[in-house]
């Protein structure tokens, strides 16, 4: 198990290198002069002298390979440089905003599991009767809803009309409810559909007939044979949802003024704040890669075929 | 039934997009401080926004921007995905291994965040949003086309064509593309709504078209400060997005049921 984890971890290193290098090259070879962006964000007038000085200070006059190496060697020492607009260390800022985003995405993930799986089971057990039709209609609507717009709808209903929940901010457990629902809806509906078809698949299998023939009570059959087996496909897809939820959270954050990475990244994009962009890409890629790794490890733990198999990549 | 409804909805939306310049009663960018935040009336069917612009006209022009962006993304993703996938599948060996490593790297990061990365590198604007969404989705198509190409290459009739002297290009054009087409159509139609949501979301973040332009995402962003006074300004463009995505998803489901029953339950 440990060997498997280490092997998987080692395959991540080239991936992070490739992503950071490609992104670095796109930034540097893209349009515009980084020195100009730097001076604008530092609120200095772009005179020739200032530009030349900025290029020298930022190392922009050096070859690209040297520039990338200096960024990379900094990153290895956990130094991602300083933001051009605030002057503070990028890593410190990213780590300041990351927890709120992770909290939102994590709460949404919990909702996806707690709502999507039971409703999917319900839909399958009541196949072609009204609970099935209702949940499927809701799921169809749910996968078509823009998450940020759903956020506005929730605010309109629960804050403006009813006054039950705070419309914005991150203050107390009540404030996370609406952002989490808006973030989770799409994934929850996808999970519901997957769970429904998985349960229907299991219900058609022969060992269930045998279980019934053995006289096992309905509860045991449902709990042990149907639900446990049917949960595998939707749980497999959860690995993908973690990433989608984090991305979705960054959009939903803007509706609820949730103080996460969304606004921070957005500012960096519109400002063209190079060190922040590079740091953001590195940290986010690392987060996704670690999420995928956790999911893989969970499989390997459940399924020894993967652990000992040749397919490590 | 499902197919007809989906086709009807998509046709109406496409019609709105194509004929927006003739259908729209007003210039979508024409401001009028005298008629700000008006409720619906005979003159302005859906009212006006905070700058006195006609909401119906802006919605129609917004359809043009959103649907246009999705159409271009569709073309680009199909072209890039098929090109890379077919190249990898037909050539095999080192080329295949390298292309698929690149595709894997693109598939590690979730699509919306990957699109954000690319917009960060390329800058904002609708063109860059389109490029960013294309770059964050082509890898799935490349994988699908490669897999189908590989399985086709092993078929007898393709081998027979090769033996009969057909070049690799001939094989790709005559035998591989038609077989792959159906599968691609299913996957792409299921993704149309997904791209629509990405375009709208990124515009909502202010990364797409600049402020005066009419696009559904940016309309919602524009209307935010007036949300409590005039919630319709947020609700209407969102309803337009929802309707479009619903239509696309309906079409995708219908196509999948018809062309590829094995894919049932596939969800993006």
Image (cartoon, coloured by chain):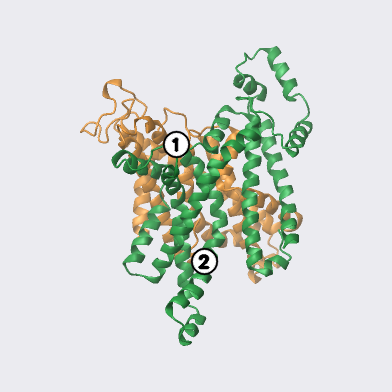
Dots 2 and 1: beta carbons under 8 Å?
no
* Quarter of the picture holding the C terminus of chain A: bottom right
| Residues tagged by mark 2 and mark 1 found on one chain of the structure | yes
Q: Nearer the viewer, mark 2 or mark 1?
A: 1
Q: Is residue A30 visible?
A: no
The chain drawn in orange is: B
**The color chain A is rendered in:** green
Chain letter belonging to callout 2 = A
Q: Is residue A71 visible?
A: yes
Q: Residue at x 42, y 30 (%)?
A: B213
Q: Residues within 10 Å of mark 2 (few under 14, many from 20)?
A: some
Q: Which of marks 2 and 1 is nearer the N terminus?
A: 1
Q: Mark 2 points at which residue?
A: A231
Q: Is residue B240 left or right of residue A47?
A: left
Q: Quadrant of residue B156?
A: bottom right
Please tell me whether mark 2 sits on a helix, a strand or a loop. loop
Residue nearest the viewer, comparing B81 with A232: A232
Disc number placed over residue B140 in the picture, else none: none
Q: How far apart are marks 2 and 1 (CA)?
A: 35 Å
Q: Residue at x 39, y 66 (%)?
A: A123
Disc number placed over residue A169 in the picture, else none: 1
* Residue B144 percent coordinates (x, y): 59, 58
Residue reaching furthest left?
A: B42
Q: Residue at x 46, y 45 (%)?
A: B197
* Residue B90 percent coordinates (x, y): 69, 58
């Amino acid at each position: 198990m440990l060997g498997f984890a280490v092997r998987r971890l080692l395959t991540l290193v080239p991936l992070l290198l490739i992503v950071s290098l490609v992104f670095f090259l796109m930034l540097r070879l893209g349009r515009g002069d980084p020195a100009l962006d730097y001076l604008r964000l530092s609120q200095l007038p772009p005179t020739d002298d200032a530009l030349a000085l900025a290029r020298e200070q930022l190392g922009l006059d050096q070859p690209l390979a040297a520039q990338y190496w200096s960024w990379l060697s900094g990153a290895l020492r956990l130094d991602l440089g300083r933001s051009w607009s605030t002057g503070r260390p990028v890593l410190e800022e990213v780590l300041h905003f990351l927890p709120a985003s992770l909290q939102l995405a994590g709460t949404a993930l919990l909702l996806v599991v707690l709502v999507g799986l039971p409703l999917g089971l319900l839909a399958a057990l009541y196949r072609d009767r009204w609970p099935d039709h209702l949940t499927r209609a809701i799921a169809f609507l749910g996968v078509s809803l823009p998450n940020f717009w759903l956020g506005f709808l929730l605010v309109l209903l629960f804050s403006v009309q009813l006054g039950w929940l705070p419309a914005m901010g991150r203050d107390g457990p009540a404030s996370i409810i609406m952002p989490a629902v808006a973030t989770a809806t799409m994934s929850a509906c996808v999970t519901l559909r997957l769970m429904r078809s998985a349960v229907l698949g299991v219900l058609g299998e022969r060992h269930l007939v045998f279980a019934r023939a053995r006289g096992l009570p309905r509860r045991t059959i449902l709990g042990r044979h149907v639900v446990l087996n049917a949960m595998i496909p939707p749980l497999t897809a959860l690995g993908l949802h973690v990433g989608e939820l984090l991305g979705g959270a960054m959009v939903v954050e803007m509706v609820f003024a949730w103080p996460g990475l969304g606004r921070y990244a957005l500012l960096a994009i519109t400002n063209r704040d190079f060190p922040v962009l590079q740091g953001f890409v590195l940290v986010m890629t690392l987060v996704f890669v670690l999420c995928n790794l956790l999911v893989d490890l969970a499989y390997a733990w459940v399924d020894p075929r993967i652990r000992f198999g040749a397919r490590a990549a | 039934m499902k197919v007809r409804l989906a086709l009807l909805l998509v046709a109406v939306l496409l019609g709105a997009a194509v004929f927006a310049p003739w259908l729209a009663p007003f210039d979508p960018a024409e401001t009028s401080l005298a008629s700000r935040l008006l409720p619906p009336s005979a003159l302005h069917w859906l009212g006006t926004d905070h700058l006195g612009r006609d909401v119906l006209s802006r919605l129609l022009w917004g359809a043009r921007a959103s649907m246009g962006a999705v159409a271009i993304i569709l073309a680009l993703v199909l072209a890039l995905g098929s090109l890379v996938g077919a190249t990898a599948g037909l050539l095999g060996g080192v080329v295949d291994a390298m292309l698929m490593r690149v595709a894997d790297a693109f598939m590690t990061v979730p699509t919306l965040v990957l699109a954000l990365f690319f917009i960060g590198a390329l800058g904002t604007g609708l063109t860059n949003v389109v490029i960013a969404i294309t770059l964050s989705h082509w890898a799935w198509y490349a994988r699908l086309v490669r897999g189908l190409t590989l399985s086709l290459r092993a078929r007898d009739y393709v081998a027979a064509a090769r033996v009969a002297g057909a070049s690799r290009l001939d094989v790709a054009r005559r035998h591989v593309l038609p077989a792959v087409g159906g599968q691609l159509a299913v996957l792409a139609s299921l993704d149309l709504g997904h791209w629509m949501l990405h375009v709208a979301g990124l515009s909502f973040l202010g990364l797409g078209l600049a402020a005066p332009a009419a696009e559904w995402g940016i309309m919602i962003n524009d209307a935010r400060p007036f949300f409590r006074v005039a919630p319709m300004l947020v609700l209407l463009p969102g309803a337009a997005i929802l309707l479009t995505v619903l239509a696309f998803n309906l079409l995708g489901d219908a196509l999948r049921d018809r062309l590829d029953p094995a894919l049932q339950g596939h969800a993006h």
